[in-house]
Image: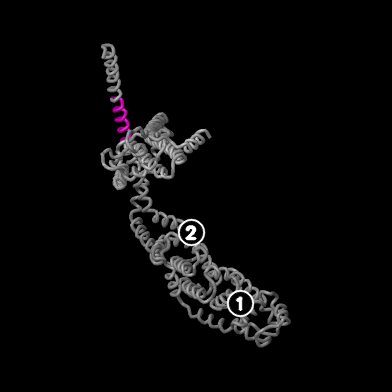
Amino acid sequence: MSTSALEKLMFTVGITDMVSQPAQSINKTITGMKHNATSGFDAIRGGMFGLAGAGIAIKTFMQPVYDVDKALGEVRSLGVIESELKTLTKQSLIFSSTYGESAADFIKSSYDIQSAIGGLNNGELAKFTNASNILAKGTKADAATITNYMGTMYGIFETQANAMGKAKWVEQLTGQTALAVQMFKTDGANMSAAFTSIGANATASGVAINEQMAILGTLQATMSGSEAGTKYKSFLAGVAGAQDKLGLSFTDSEGRLLPMLSIMDKLKGKFGSTFNEMEGLQLKKAFGSDEAVSLIKLLMGKTKGLGESMDALGKITGMKNAEKMAKAMVDPWEKFQSITEAVRIGFGTALMPVINDLLQTMGDGLQTLTGWTQEFPNITRWVGLLTLGILGMSAATGLFSILLGLGRTAMAAWGAGVLLMKGVIIGLNVVLGALKIAWALVSLAMMINPIGLIVVSIVALVAGVTMLTDWWGKLADMFKNSEWGKAVIGWIDDIVAKFNMLKSLFGFGGGFDSSINIDKTINTTSTSANPVIDAVNPLKNNSDSAPGLAAQIASAITGGGVSFGDVTINAEGGMNPEAMEDWGALQGG
């Protein structure tokens, strides 16, 4: 090497050393900065998330307590004293744990009861609320519907309720309504609709609650609750005028309406158990409406069942059957959840004064801070800018990490693409080689005798193995460093070993190694007695032993030689004229 060339080389090496060392230092500095920034912001985020998580955990734990407290505040706004609220809270926890419902919703339902019913004291609000919610649970109605029903019923039967005592009356009403739902095709919502439609008309006429409930329940076998109430109301409106027109008395000596069964018996005595068209018109004229006649026709054939229902409802004095129905509706998982919520409410109620004091202190501090922001606007601005700067640096660090990740992903994708392109190039080489061999074999088959077809098969086999070996060598170099590649290479080597064993059985000596590349060009120039064998068996055994099976077959072939593609076959005797003509026609065509 000349001195000038050596100097150039040394200069290049020197430049490389001068650049690489500072570059490595810069890279380490950048990496360190990224690591420190990432660690710092991770610590900040971790602390913030930890603080927020603690706050959320406390808020979640205390949420049922706040819900109950909010509901109590609504009831407190109606003027309910604290002792009644304490009793209401205790009853809400008992109901919640027993029936798997929300304690807060229980307290909220008492708001409507307190609004509709005045003068509740000595725990009556809690008992009304408890009875309403048990009835709602047992009759598949929502609490709002039943509390409205309770208010309506108290308005209708206020005199009776005050005489019995409100707490005892509401428990009886709850039990009677639950039994009516069991006996008739109805539910709590429809019974509420029925009594809402009829109002106080029946009570004003002296009809007992059990009779009203039995009549409305029986009618609901074929109609809705509101329709049943409308028909009953029409009947009551026309019964006083009907007795004069029909010449019948439907009231007692004190002017109170007779029981429905007595009225039905008197109508049966005049018209019989059924009515023809003329009798129906007479009834309509007497009672003044189709609704009243419809009620009479429906109840006329059900007087026995109606009487039994009245008796059963009249015997109810408490709400045990309603409690039984409600417990049958309880879901075990909902009950368990409500019990755990009740426990949280118990602990939370004890902790609430402490937490409220803490929140009050924090609130006062934030209020002071709010005042400072107004009093010191410049400091506020610089603190805000500092906060934004920290957030901006955090965002920049995150963006830098994203860019690094994208770069690594792009490099991995580029490597995969290069590997894929190498595979495609190898595949194309294999296909082109296969096409050349196929064309050579077709040409050979056209110009030699039938025995030559066997030789063609052998040529195809050897050429195919040659190409496979060449391809396999390249593929092995690509995948030898991967675990799955090694597994595939081992599998192919096993196949090659079995192929070599088959070759030895048919007289071909030698063998080949899957890791060795074999030249695709077959040189058939030979001085042996079997030149065709030289052409088709480049891996033949070069020993002086007798030729194999392929050699014995090829010895019967005579003729000249021909070249096609990269393969040349030479024979001493030349080709026969007919084959030459076919070959010439094929090449020229």
Magenta span: helix, strand or loop, mainly?
helix
Q: What residue sits 52% from the left and 75% below the top?
A: 180
Q: Is residue 302 left or right of residue 96?
A: right
Mark found first going from the N terminus, 2 or 1? 2
- Label 2 residue SS: loop
Residue 299 position in % (x across, y down)? 61, 80
Which span is picked out in magenta?
25-43
Circle on res. 205 = 1
Residue 168 position in % (x across, y down)? 46, 73
Q: Residue furthest bottom?
A: 269
Whether 35 is among the magenta residues is yes
Circle on res. 78 = 2
* Amino acid under disc 1: Ser
- Label 1 residue SS: loop
Marks 2 and 1, Cα distance to the nearest angstrom? Answer: 34 Å
Total residue callouts: 2
Judging depth in this view, the residue of 246 and 492 nearest the camera is: 492
